[in-house]
Amino acid sequence: MDMYRVDPVALAQSYDIEVVGTPFIDVDGSIEKKDTKIVLMYNTNSHPNRQRFTIAHELGHFIAGHLNGSTKMFRDQSKNFTIDNYDIQEVEANQIAAQILMPQETVKHLIEDVGISTIEELASILDVSTGAMHYRLKNLGII
Ligand SMILES: [Zn+2]
C-alpha cells in the first residue's frame, strides 16, 4: 500500500526547492524566495502527518505562483491549514496540498477498485490525518 503514499519532500525537490526540516522555527512551515532560490522550511516538532501537510501546503504557495508577486515569504501556523481560513492564498495552498497528498484518481481507485471503505484506512494508506481525509472526501463529493 506504500505505493500510494506521496513524498512531498521529493516532490518539492523536483521543483528545485531546498527543503529544510528543523525544530528551531516558531511556525509550522514557511516558504521563501531568496533571489533565484526557493527555501521551504518545516517544523520537525510537529506531528508527522502535520509535517507532510505543511510541506505540501508550502509547495502549494509555490505552485500557485504566490511567490511571483511582491510577497517573498509565507509563514504558516497550523491555523492557516483549517477550513476556517478565508485568505484566498491560504485556501489555494490548502487545495493544492490536498490534491498533492490525496489525488482524486488515487482516492477513487482505492475506494472503487481496492475496496477501501473507511476514512481511517484511506488516511493510513495515504499517510494523512483522518481530518484531512474527511475534508478531502467531502470536497470530492464522495461523502
Ligand atoms: Zn500558507
Image (tube, helix red, strand yellow):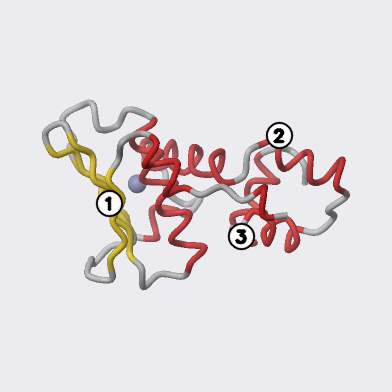
Q: Is residue 45 left or right of residue 34?
A: right
**Could you tell me if the residues under marks 3 and 2 are in contact, i.e. CB atoms within 8 Å?**
no
| Number of callouts | 3
- Outermost left residue: 35
**Which image quadrant is residue 26 in?**
bottom left
Q: Secondary structure at mark 1?
A: strand
Give the percent coordinates (x, y) of residue 118.
Answer: 80, 59
Could you tell me how far apart the alpha carbons at marks 2 and 1 are, in whole angstroms? 29 Å
Residue 89 lies, with reference to residue 10, above or below; the image says above
Give the percent coordinates (x, y) of residue 13.
Answer: 36, 41
How packed is label 1: few (under 14 Cα within 10 Å), some, or many (20 or more)? many
- The numbered disc on residue 30 is 1
Give the percent coordinates (x, y) of residue 57.
Answer: 42, 46
- The numbered disc on residue 105 is 2
Q: Secondary structure at mark 3?
A: helix
Residue 61 lies, with reference to residue 143, above or below; the image says above
Q: Earlier in the sequence, mark 2 or mark 1?
A: 1
Q: Earlier in the sequence, mark 3 or mark 1?
A: 1
Ligand 1 within 8 Å of disc 3? The answer is: no
Could you tell me how far apart the alpha carbons at marks 3 and 2 are, in whole angstroms? 19 Å
Viewer-proximal residue among 62 and 90: 62
Amino acid identity at mark 1: Ser
Amino acid identity at mark 3: Gly
- The numbered disc on residue 131 is 3
Q: Residue at x 79, y 39 (%)?
A: 109
Could you tell me how far apart the alpha carbons at marks 3 and 1 are, in whole angstroms? 22 Å
How packed is label 3: few (under 14 Cα within 10 Å), some, or many (20 or more)? few
Q: Secondary structure at mark 2?
A: helix
Q: Earlier in the sequence, mark 3 or mark 2?
A: 2
Viewer-proximal residue among 138 and 93: 93
Choose mark 3 or mark 2, whichever is in front: 2
Q: Residue at x 87, y 41 (%)?
A: 113
